[in-house]
Structures are given as C-alpha cells and as structure tokens.
Image (tube, rainbow, N blue to C red):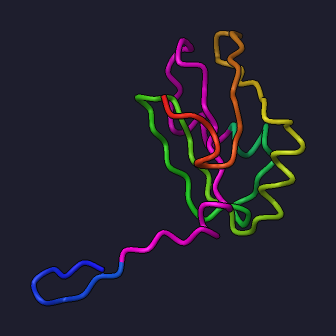
Amino acid sequence: MLVIQGVEVVLEADMSDRLKTSVCSFDPRSPRISAYDIHEWINDRLRLAKEDITLIQIDGLNRRVSIKFSNETRMEEILEGTEGKCVYKHDTGELSQVNVKIAGMGTKG
C-alpha cells in the first residue's frame, strides 16, 4: 500500500491480468512499423476482434506489442494457433519474424 497526501492507494498487480496478456516481439532489425499497421496486423493476422482485446500497448523502441485479452481462453487460442511464432509482412514485401508469448514468461532483453 502507498499513501499519497493522506490518501491510501493500493498497488496490486492482479496475476489474472498478467495471465491474460501476451507480448508480440518483432524482430529488432526490422523496419519500424506504424501504430496503424500494428492494429491492422492484429486484426488481419491474429484474427482478433475489438471484443477480444481490452488494451494494446506499443513499445516502439523495443519493437514489442502487449495485448491484454478480455478472456484467457482467447489468448490461449492465439498462442496455440501461432505456436509462439508469427510473421509480419512490411509494405516493401520484407518479412519479419514475430515471437508471441504470455507476458512475463520470456526473458528480458
């Protein structure tokens, strides 16, 4: 618990939230990808609808995209369907490898 100017603030990371979050790590050597193109890729390649997702966080510097799912089952379907690997096709035709994992289950770096 944290107290800020007399107000108690509870800082708890709900483990169930982490279990509903996946991280897509794009090849760091690949060309930069716009936020719009990432959203299109999520819809087209991962076949995720708006209802499947509660949050998307893009870390452009580290080429990672965190996707928080509305339910754990849908996330598991994506992980099984991709077998942890996916491809992103750039406008130039270049293909980039994308690793898909449960948040917090990979190595840092």
Which residue range is magenta in the image?
11-40
Residue 20 in percent (x, y) is at 68, 61
- Nearest to the observer: residue 66 or residue 19: 19
Q: Quadrant of the N terminus?
A: bottom left
Please name the residue shown 56% across and 41% down the image. Answer: 65
Residue 3 on the magenta segment: no
Residue 72 in percent (x, y) is at 76, 65
* In this picture, residue 78 sits left or right of residue 9: right
Vertical position of residue 109 compared to residue 19: above or below:
above
Residue 76 in percent (x, y) is at 82, 55
Q: Quadrant of residue 14?
A: bottom right
Please name the residue shown 55% across and 52% down the image. Answer: 56
Residue 33 on the magenta segment: yes
* In this picture, residue 45 sits left or right of residue 107: right
Vertical position of residue 32 compared to residue 21: above or below:
above
Q: What is the tally of numbered marks visible in this picture?
A: 0
* In this picture, residue 38 sits left or right of residue 71: left
- Nearest to the observer: residue 108 or residue 56: 108
Please name the residue shown 69% across and 37% down the image. Answer: 41
Vertical position of residue 63 compared to residue 89: above or below:
below
Residue 68 in percent (x, y) is at 62, 58
Please name the residue shown 54% across and 12% down the image. Answer: 29
- Nearest to the observer: residue 27 or residue 107: 107
